[in-house]
Amino acid sequence: MFGSFALELVACVLFFAFSTYACIFADPETSPLGRFCTVTIPNRLLLTLERCLGRDLLSRLSKLNQRAFQIFYLVVVLGSWSIVFAYGYPMIRDSSHISSHHRYVGAVTFLACMVSWDRACRTRPGNVTRTSMVLYDHYPYDGVLYAEGAVCPSLKIRKIARSKYDRVSGRHVPRFDHHCGWLNTAIGERNYGAFLMFVGVQVGMCCYGTWAMWRVLAGGGNEKELF
């Protein structure tokens, strides 16, 4: 029984390692395996779906799918804050273990959360074209990941250092980091600051909310001798 479990564990680890390399680390522009897993397979699936559903319906579903993480984010964040405003705020008001001023701090935190998300969604990462290339061509070539003279196979323009073609937006992004589903945009040179602000605000919101609710719930539990 242990031997069977060990084999299953090894198989899962190998599959995870293979998937991680093929879908994340392998560059589809230079790696046949990366291109097969991240370009060929998705394209064939889309072609099959197009034949089954039709081009118009597939186009609508594709646009909705691109915003799926944004919708999920709003459902989670707005739903959680609705619970906090409806049930958490009366507990803060009546609690002797946390100042009632935290009701206002919480409202400011919620606004900061929404504003940082909206700003990060709206700020574009930059777009490398033949005319705008001079604005972004200021990073050194390392000769490993970024070779001087390389050409983007999708747009047929010179691939400057630290840039990459984003298949979702169809643009060549300067200082490409990743495509963020929560913001539905690529993260690049011109929106990296907005992205870091968004992440920082979310982390701060989670830490502050955890601390505030712990003060309220733990204080009430101590008063009722539940702990």
Image (cartoon, rainbow, N blue to C red):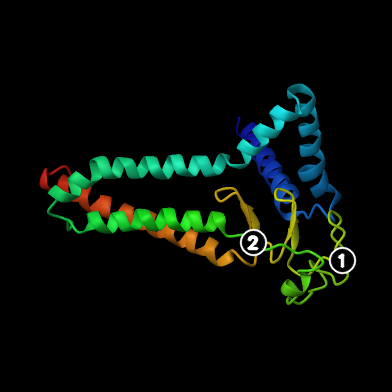
Q: Position of residue 201 (x, y in %)?
A: 43, 60
Quick check: 195 above or below 139?
above
Mark with earlier residue (1, 2):
2
Q: Image check: 15 left or right of 101? A: right
Mark 2 is on which residue type? Pro
Q: Which residue matches tag 1?
A: 150
Q: Image check: 65 left or right of 133? A: left
Q: Position of residue 144 (x, y in %)?
A: 81, 69
Residues 192 and 31: in front is: 192
Where does the C terminus fall, quadrant-wise? top left
Q: Image check: 81 left or right of 69? A: left
Residue extending furthest top? 52
Tell me which residue sits at (16%, 50%) in the image: 93
Q: Which residue matches tag 2?
A: 125
Tell me which residue sits at (17%, 58%) in the image: 99
Residues 106 and 56: in front is: 56
Quick check: 201 above or below 16?
below
Q: Position of residue 150 (x, y in %)?
A: 87, 66
Where does the N terminus fall, quadrant-wise? top right
Measured Cα–Cα span from mark 1 to mark 2 = 21 Å
